[in-house]
């Protein structure tokens, strides 16, 4: 179909700024595209990977189908253990918020499970966080408050076949 044009490596810093700008303008698709161009020019660019993960998860709120496996692939390329755990938590938190907004049958229990996953990742990140960085605590508390405010609960398990 089309052969994409390559970004010059020298243009990466300016492109990163554009990606941040498009995220702030609530245009995650444009930010995602720019990040993909950056990663073609500089495959290990950690800032572009993080921006890409954030842009992709921004799209949850808009109801776009975003493949979890694609996001997981990019998260796996983040080399800093703290950042990988922290941004994985953010992805789960954003997915939970999107599910909660759907207000469909079973959404509450699904959102609960996703918030708990986010909280688990924030706890992992908290254990290895940089000194004086309490971002993980703020995110964990935010998830806990949403669960409590909305009275979210885990799924009720169906009776096991061995239960009589």
Image (cartoon, rainbow, N blue to C red):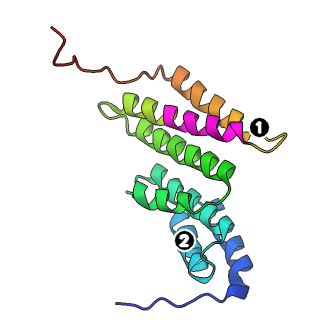
The percent position of residue 51, horizontal first and vertical second, equals: 62, 63
Q: Which residues are magenta?
A: 116-128
**Which quadrant of the figure has residue 50?**
bottom right
Compared to residue 154, the image places residue 116 above or below, namely below
Q: Quadrant of the N terminus?
A: bottom left
Name the residue at 61% across, 52% down: 84
The percent position of residue 115, horizontal first and vertical second, equals: 50, 34
Decide which of tag 1 and tag 2 comes sooner along the chain: 2
Name the residue at 54% across, 68% down: 32
Compared to residue 16, the image places residue 142 above or below, namely above
Name the residue at 43% across, 32% down: 113
- Pair 1/2: label in front: 1
Left or right: 74, with 99 as reference point: right
Left or right: 109, with 24 as reference point: left
Contact between marks 1 and 2 (CB within 8 A): the answer is no
Per the picture, the main secondary structure of the magenta-coloured stretch is helix
Specify the farthest residue to the top: 164
- 120 or 135, which is in the foreground? 120
Left or right: 94, with 12 as reference point: left
Left or right: 103, with 82 as reference point: left
Q: Which residue is mark 1?
A: 134
SS for dot 1: loop
Q: Which residue is mark 2?
A: 30
- Total numbered labels placed on residues in the image: 2
Mark drawn on residue 3? none
The percent position of residue 161, horizontal first and vertical second, equals: 16, 19
The percent position of residue 144, horizontal first and vertical second, equals: 58, 26
Gap between marks 1 and 2, in whole Å? 31 Å
Q: Is residue 129 shown to the viewer in this render?
A: yes
Residue 14 part of the magenta-drawn span: no
Residue 122 part of the magenta-drawn span: yes
Name the residue at 38% across, 28% down: 109
């Amino acid at each position: 179909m089309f052969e994409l044009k390559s970004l010059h490596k020298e243009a990466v810093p300016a492109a990163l700024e554009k990606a941040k700008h498009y995220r702030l303008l609530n245009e995650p698709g444009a930010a995602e595209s720019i990040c993909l161009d950056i990663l073609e020019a500089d495959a290990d660019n950690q800032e572009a990977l993080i921006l890409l993960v954030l842009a992709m998860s921004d799209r949850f709120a808009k109801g776009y189908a975003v493949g979890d496996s694609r996001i997981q692939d990019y998260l796996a390329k983040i080399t800093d253990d703290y950042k990988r755990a922290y941004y994985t938590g953010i992805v789960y938190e954003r997915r939970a918020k999107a599910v909660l907004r759907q207000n469909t049958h079973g959404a509450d229990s699904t959102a609960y499970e996703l918030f708990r996953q986010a909280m688990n990742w924030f706890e992992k990140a908290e254990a290895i966080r940089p000194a004086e960085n309490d971002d993980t605590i703020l995110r964990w508390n935010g998830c806990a408050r949403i669960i409590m405010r909305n009275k979210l609960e885990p799924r009720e398990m169906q009776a096991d076949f061995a239960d009589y």
